[in-house]
Structure formats: C-alpha cells, structure tokens
Amino acid sequence: MEVTWWGHATCTVEDSGVRVLTDPLFAPRLGHLRRRRGALPPPEAARADVVLVSHLHADHLHLPSLARLAPGTRLVVPLGAVRAVPGLRRLTGLRITEVAAGDEVKAGPVAVRAVPAAHDGRRLPVGPRRSPALGYVIAGAARTYFAGDTGLYDGMAAAVGAVDVALLPVGGWGPFLGHGHLDAGRAARAVAELAPAAAVPVHYGTYWPIGLDAVRPHEFHAPGGEFARLAARRAPEVAVHLLGHGESVRPGAGR
C-alpha cells in the first residue's frame, strides 16, 4: 500500500492494485486562494479507479478538477451532492455514487466505507444543509482512514474502527480555524484515540489567501511539523510521515 500527497486534501492511496484519489484539487488558484507551495499535480494524479469527495466545499468538491478524470471513473460523493451542486450533472462520463455514513462501495478487492465527520459540509456560501460531511475508510491490504475535514467528536474511534494509516487534516487555508476542523493539537488527540500504526498530516501548507502572505505565516508552514511533535508526545507508537508535495510513502501492511 502506498500513499502520495499532492497537496491540500488531495491524496492517492494505491492498495491491492486499486488507485483511490481523495478530494482532487488541481488548480493554481481558487477564488481568493492561491497555491503557494508545491507544483501542480502532474496528469497522472488524475488517474484513479475511485475518487472520494468528503464534502461540498469548493476546495474539496472542485468541478474543473473532477472534469479531468477519465470517463468511467467511479466518483463517490456525500448523499444529496448532485442536487446541491448541479454542475455534477454535467460530468456525464463519471459514475457518480452518493453515500451516507455506514455505506460501503466496492472496487475490486478494496472496500470503501463512509464514516461520519464533524464539519459543515454544505455547498457554501448559501447551500442547504442537506449533504453530510464524510470521512472514508479504504480497506484492502491495509485500512486507511481519510478524514476529509472534521473536528473531534464523541465516538470518533468507534465510528472509524481499527485503521492502520490515518490521513488527518492539521491546518487550513487561513490563519484561523473555526469549529469543525482539526489543527495540529486536535489532530494529535485524534491520532491518539484512533491508534493507527502510521499517520500522514494533510490539508496544510498548500493554499493561502491572496494578500495574506505576511499575516501569521507560521500558520501556513508549521502545522505538519507541529502535529509530528505533538503526536510523538501523545501517541509515541504511531509513525508520523511528513510528506512533501508529490512525495509518497509505503507505511506498511495491515496489522
């Protein structure tokens, strides 16, 4: 099993010959956000058997990036996404499957199970609260948890279940994180509760608001290293892999 981090929440998890892509975002700019670190992912990053979208925010469900997927690709989105984001209907070449927490999608020898997330997952700024934010557990040779965007919530470890690898958000695209997010400290608490064999911090150090380069710049650069430091204190048995953009790691087989 191999994990590649392309930046922000975009990862490829290759397990048992199946390529799973998370929250693809391949844009140099999105609204007021600019990609400040890491080259844009190469064309191969859009190659996937299954694509998982955690929630409807435009930096996670990005229609131009989804349009780069090959015809026939399975796209898994939260329940109600097609109604809330009409542009999904124009992606006629994709096989779209809507899921709620507890639902499972099979892709050859890999099973993908949707799990809850504590996050406002609607299409901002005015989308109705009809689509849940989700995480996903990708089960093949290993069990990999992609958290999407989430805060800590009661029963998180029980809802996610036993996992070998956790891909956890540790930052954001602005100097302040509100309710429903993990910062480095909360992500370290989450990894202690989940107790995976390995963790990869994501969702930091990629996009930043235009004009705010000099405003709290440490909030852009520091979350990955801060998470590694705090996780070593709270969960020393968990191996934390800090990846650069486009870098890959093979965290090991399942327990």
Image (cartoon, grey):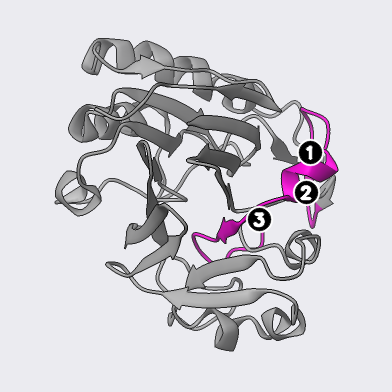
Q: Which quadrant is home to the C terminus? A: top left
Could you tell me how far apart the alpha carbons at marks 1 and 3 are, in whole angstroms?
15 Å
Quadrant for residue 214, please give it: top right
Q: Is residue 96 left or right of residue 206?
A: left
Residue named by callout 2: 26
Instruction: Check disc 1 and report its element: helix, strand or loop.
Output: loop
Could you tell me how far apart the alpha carbons at marks 2 and 3 are, in whole angstroms?
10 Å
Q: Which residues are magenta?
A: 30-59
Q: Is residue 107 left or right of residue 214?
A: left
Q: Amino acid at mark 2?
A: Phe
Q: In this orientation, which residue lies closer to the viewer: 253 or 125?
A: 253
Callout 1–callout 2 Cβ contact below 8 Å: yes
Q: Main secondary structure of the magenta part?
A: loop
Q: Amino acid at mark 3?
A: Asp
Residue named by callout 3: 59
Residue 57 point in image, percent of width and height: 59, 63
Residue named by callout 1: 41
Which of the two labelled residues, at mark 2 and mark 3, occupies the earlier sequence position? Answer: 2
Instruction: Check disc 3 and report its element: helix, strand or loop.
Output: loop
Above or below for 167 versus 122: above
